[in-house]
C-alpha cells in the first residue's frame, strides 16, 4: 500500500514524458524547452507540499490527512485533463504535485512510527523497490495510451488510479501514530521543530546531500525526452530506453533492502556516493569528447540511476533517526528540502540543455561532489562508520 501511495507521485512524472511534445504543441507553449515545465512544476509543487502534510499528519493523524490528500490529488488530475491553456496547465500541475507529496511524506512517517535503524532502511528500500518499478512501466504506459488516445487520457488514467488508492487506504489502513506523539499546530512549537530539524548535525548533511544528488536526477528527468528522443535520435523508442535504465534503479533498491541490515546504511550509501562522483565525472567527459555517442551515455547513466537505489532510502532513513517524537514534521521538512530543492536544481539543469548531455554530466559530477562534502560534515569527517546502538533522540 505504501509503495503504491508513493507511486502516484512517479506516475504523475513519468507517464507524462512521452506526451510532453504533444502537450506543449496543443496548448501553445512558445519555447521547446517549456515542455519541461510540465514535469518541473509538478516536482517543485511536491517540494512545497511536503512542508504541509507532515505537520498536519503529526496533528490530526496519518490516515485522515492521507485520505484528504488523495482526494484533492484526484481533483487536480481531472482539472489537468480538461484544461485548454499552457499557463493553466503549469499552475494545476504545481498544485497536483503539492497534494501528491502527501503520499511520500506520510508513508515515510508511517514507517518511522513502526521501525527504526537499519530495519527502517530495509523497509523503506523494499517500498522503494516497488515504487521504482513505476518509472520502468510508466513511460511505456503513457506511450501506449498515446497510440489509442490523446494526452488527456493519461490524466484520466491517473484520476482512476487515485480513486482506487483512496478506496484501498480507506478500507485497509489503520492509524499508526501513537496518541501521545500528537503535536499541536502551535506556531512556536512548529518553529522550534523546524529549527531542531535543520540544525541537527547528524541529519542535515544527509538531507542537503540528497538534495544535491536528486538535483542531478531531476535534471535528467526534465531533459530526458529531448536528450534521448531528439539528440540521440531514438524517437518513440525513448519510453523503452528510459524504462530500461530505470529498471536498474528498481533492482538496486531491492539489493539494498537485502544487504543494508548486514552492512549498515552508512557503509552502503557512502560507497555508492563515491562511485556516483566518479561516474558523474565520466559522463561529463563522455559528453564533452563524444557528444553523439549514445553507447557511452546509456551505460554510464544507467550506473548513475542504479546508484540512486543505494542512496535515497538510506539517506532518508539516517536523516529521520533522531526524530521519533515528531517523525511526520521531520519527514515533511526533510522531504520538502530534498524534493523541492532537488526540483529547483533539476529545473536549472534541464533549462541548460544545449542539445548535448554535457550540462547534465557537469551537474551529475558537481552536485554529487557537493553531496559528498555535506555527508562528511554530518559524519564529522569519517565515512563508513556503522553506528552502534541508537542515534540520540530529539525530545518533543
Image: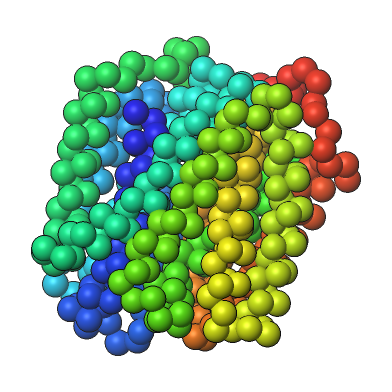
Of residue 394 and residue 261, the one placed in the foreground of this image is 261
Question: Where residue 130 sits in the image (x, y, percent)?
Answer: 42, 37
| Side of 141 relative to 254 (left or right) | left
- Of residues 379 and 144, the one nearer the viewer is 144
Residue 174 visible, this angle: yes
Kindly give the residue lying farthest to the right in the view shown: 381
Q: Position of residue 251 (x, y in %)?
A: 52, 42
The quadrant in which the N terminus is found is top left
Task: Identify which residue is drawn at 75% across, 62% down.
Answer: 278
Q: Left or right: 391 with respect to 14?
A: right
Quarter of image, res 365: bottom right
Taking the image as shown, residue 376 lies to the left or right of residue 166, namely right
Q: Quadrant of residue 262?
A: top right
* Identity of the residue drawn at 34% across and 76% down: 235
* Position above or below: 278 against 97: below
Q: Vertical placement of 340 versus 223: above or below?
A: above
Residue at horizontal 71%, vertical 38%? Answer: 268
Please state the total of marks drawn on the protein image. 0
* Residue 198 visible somewhere in the drawing: no
> x, y percentage for residue 334?
57, 43
Tell me residue 112's x, y (percent).
54, 24
Residue sitting at x 69%, y 56%: 276
Amino acid at each position: 500500500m505504501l509503495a503504491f501511495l508513493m507511486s502516484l507521485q512517479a506516475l504523475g512524472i513519468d507517464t507524462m514524458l512521452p506526451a510532453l511534445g504533444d502537450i506543449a504543441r496543443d496548448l501553445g507553449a512558445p519555447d521547446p524547452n517549456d515542455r519541461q515545465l510540465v514535469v518541473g512544476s509538478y516536482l517543485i509543487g511536491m517540494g512545497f507540499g511536503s512542508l504541509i502534510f507532515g505537520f498536519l499528519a503529526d496533528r490530526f493523524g496519518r490516515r485522515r490527512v492521507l485520505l484528504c490528500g488523495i482526494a484533492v490529488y484526484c481533483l487536480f488530475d481531472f482539472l489537468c485533463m480538461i484544461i485548454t491553456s499552457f499557463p493553466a496547465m503549469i499552475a494545476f500541475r504545481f498544485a497536483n504535485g503539492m497534494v501528491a507529496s502527501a503520499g511520500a511524506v506520510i508513508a515515510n512517517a508511517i514507517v518511522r512510527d513502526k521501525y527504526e535503524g537499519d530495519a527502517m532502511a530495509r523497509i523503506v528500500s523494499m517500498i522503494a523497490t516497488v515504487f521504482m518499478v513505476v518509472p520502468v512501466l510508466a513511460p511505456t504506459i503513457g506511450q501506449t495510451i498515446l497510440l489509442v488516445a490523446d494526452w488527456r487520457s493519461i490524466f484520466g488514467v491517473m484520476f482512476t488510479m487515485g480513486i482506487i488508492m483512496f478506496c484501498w487506504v480507506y478500507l485497509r489502513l489503520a492509524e499508526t501514530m501513537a496518541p501521545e506523539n500528537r503535536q499541536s499546530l502551535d506556531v512556536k512549537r512548529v518553529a522550534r521543530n523546524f529549527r531542531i530539524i535543520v540544525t541537527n548535525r547528524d541529519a542535515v548533511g544527509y538531507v542537503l546531500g540528497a538534495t544535491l544528488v536528486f538535483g542531478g536526477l531531476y535534471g535528467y528527468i526534465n531533459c530526458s525526452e529531448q536528450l534521448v528522443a531528439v539528440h540521440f535520435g531514438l524517437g518513440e523508442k525513448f519510453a523503452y530506453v528510459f524504462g530500461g535504465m530505470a529498471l536498474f534503479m528498481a533492482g538496486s533498491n531491492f539489493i539494498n533492502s537485502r544487504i543494508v541490515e548486514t552492512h549498515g546504511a552508512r557503509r552502503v550509501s557512502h560507497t555508492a556516493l563515491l562511485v556516483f562522483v566518479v561516474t558523474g565525472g565520466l559522463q561529463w567527459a563522455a559528453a564533452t569528447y563524444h557528444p553523439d555517442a549514445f553507447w557511452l551515455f546509456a551505460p554510464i547513466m544507467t550506473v548513475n540511476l542504479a546508484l540512486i537505489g543505494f542512496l535515497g532510502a538510506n539517506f532518508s532513513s539516517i536523516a529521520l533517526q533522531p526524530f521519533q517524537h515528531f517523525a511526520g514534521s521531520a519527514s515533511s521538512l526533510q522531504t520538502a528540502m530534498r524534493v523541492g530543492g532537488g526540483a529547483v536544481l533539476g529545473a536549472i539543469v534541464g533549462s541548460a540543455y544545449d542539445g548535448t548531455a554535457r550540462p547534465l554530466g557537469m551537474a551529475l559530477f558537481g552536485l554529487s561532489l557537493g553531496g559528498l562534502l555535506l555527508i562528511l560534515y554530518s559524519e564529522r569527517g569519517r565515512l563508513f562508520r556503522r553506528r552502534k546502538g541508537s542515534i540520540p533522540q530529539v525530545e518533543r
